[in-house]
Amino acid sequence: MSTDRTHAAEPGRAEHRTRAAEPGRAEHRTRAAEPGHSGARERIDALERAFGPLDDPANPLGGAALLAADAAGEVLPEAERVLDAYGLNAEFVPAPLGGRLERMDVLGRLLRPVFRRDASLGFGYGLNCFFAATPVWTAGDDAQRRLAARVLLDGRRMAVARHEVAHGNDFVSDEFTVRPDDGGDGGLVLDGSKSAIANASRADGLVIFARAVGVTGSRSRTVLLLDRRELPPDRVENLARRTTTGMRSAEFGGLRITRCPVPAAAVLGEPGDGYELSLRSSLVIRGLIPSIVLAGADTALRTTARFAARPRDDGRSSLDVQHVRDVLTGAFLDLLLIDCLALVSTRGLHLLPKQMSAYAAAAAYLAPKLIAESMDEMSAVLGEATFAGDGMYGMFQKQLRDLPVTSLGHAGSAGRQVSLLPQLPYFARHAWFADPEAPAGLFALDEDLPPLDLTQPALLGDGDPLAATLVASTDLLEGAEPPDGLDEEGRAVLRFLARSLTTELGDLRKAFAQVPQGDRTALASPHNFGLADRYTLVLAAAACLGVWRGRRAAGGAPGTFLADAAWPTAALYRLCRRLGLPLPDRPGACERRVLTEVLARLHGRRSYDLYDSPLA
């Protein structure tokens, strides 16, 4: 055990860890600008070490302390001090504004050490600040961007009060309104209340989606960026905190604003841009959802694997039961599939800004769905331990409560399907089986990316290169020579599965080509919602094959896990089974290889994602 890890596990050593992280703040900023991925890896590993082992009861930042804080409905102060010392807010500020945000795939990975431990901490301390700041990075002018950057780099909070979607994201039907000030000076007056705002009482920076009085239709929402410290204190009131079943330590409070004068310069973009700005911001935010739900499920899988592997008095273990082995294998495969989509949706912001909207929606829709199913299966393995209130089984129960809240978002999974559906008839007519495949860099874990420009992503894609990757991968597997290191039998199974999924894409093309362009009524049918669900599974398969081919092309030896054909074969088999497609014989050897990796990462303290990162 390393010296740092030993110190992290000692009682009362939170102060030691905080001090250890402080010198890295300036160092992190320098390393963020280095070419390649090494600076990012160092920052991620440093944050993981700063928290110490989650399963050490003596660690003041471990599971026992986090569960106690959760039961009390409070954020663990020592954990926030670690993030203060690390300067997590700088990760949410674009590098040209003095922060460390240069790559969205890196941001997704940086969130994982936090969300593996406590979703309340990850969301309440930081991610909600990024959600609030995204409209500013997307549409703000120079002064507004500098204001948001200053708030975050000073270690303060931002909060966002979004508009209602049939009030589906709120505890009650409430909202803010904005109207011109009668004084005639061009200013505005803000009124109203909202009772479900994360960090409402702690935030200095406020991003408010307000309904313009007297305006209807798509231009009825205007977005304001406000510095609360500059508002008249008698016009802004904190409302009572709301209790939640999940993320119990996060503050969901409210604000009441009464006839508050605000300057016209507070408007983000133009008056009436609210709906479009919300949609554009969602393109960025959705790509991070797979990483945060994956991180929580990582802890759940680790807990279940440890439970299954523990020896009983008779020398046997739950791993002797085939169903238990299947659950562990399937849960890990789902996490790998989710991470493939996370990679595509975040790197797509840099590489495919005109096509990535479908991938962000698919990733944000499918990841929580797969995790929910895996959590149910793992609960059955744990049995009565699922309901434990303490220890590592208590952490499983906490993740079970928290995960649905972390993934709900502004409009939930239906909203993600709704944003996906209008694109599919176009893809069916113009893109599927016609587009070139996605660039190899989309699937790379380490390669550099073009600069991040959040003004570039398009709301509707003009092509589907990820689906083309599935078609190209199928053609490759059917070629005269199998990919290097893949024997003929292994290629036959993988080829069969890839062909089944490519045939499914062809069936989707036929179905959506029959939907009249722009016919919202036809698109909104339950049948087409079901087809959109199937499309997301096809995309997951394409992302999986793209990552596997990329690892082989990067020189990964066939015996190394990500370059091995075992995991994509087992993953595609799982996807085809979900879709009810024809199946070859079950790839038992591939699944055993995956289970071996699950147990190796458990004992080696490595993460259950594509990166196989060391854990504290």
Image (cartoon, rainbow, N blue to C red):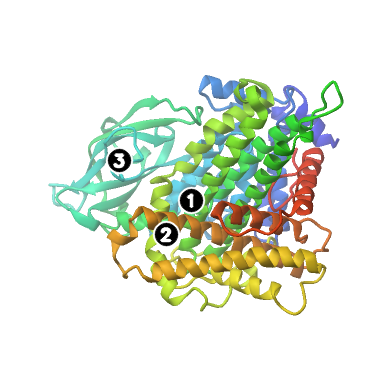
User: Is residue 408 shown left or right of residue 347?
Assistant: left
Relative depth, front residue between 496 and 449: 496
Task: Indicate whether 212 appears above or below 445.
Answer: above
Residue 324: image location, x then y, percent: 71, 36
10 Å crowding of disc 1: few (<14), some (14-19), many (20+)? many
One can see residue 383 in this view:
yes
User: Label 2 to label 1, Cα distance in Å?
Assistant: 10 Å
Disc 2: which residue: 420
Residue 444: image location, x then y, percent: 67, 64
Q: Are marks 2 and 1 in contact (CB under 8 Å)?
A: yes
Q: Amino acid at mark 1?
A: Tyr
Relative depth, front residue between 184 and 603: 603
Disc 3: which residue: 167
Residue at point 62%, 68% (across, down): 499
User: Label 1 to label 3, Cα distance in Å?
Assistant: 20 Å
10 Å crowding of disc 2: few (<14), some (14-19), many (20+)? many
For label 2, the SS is helix
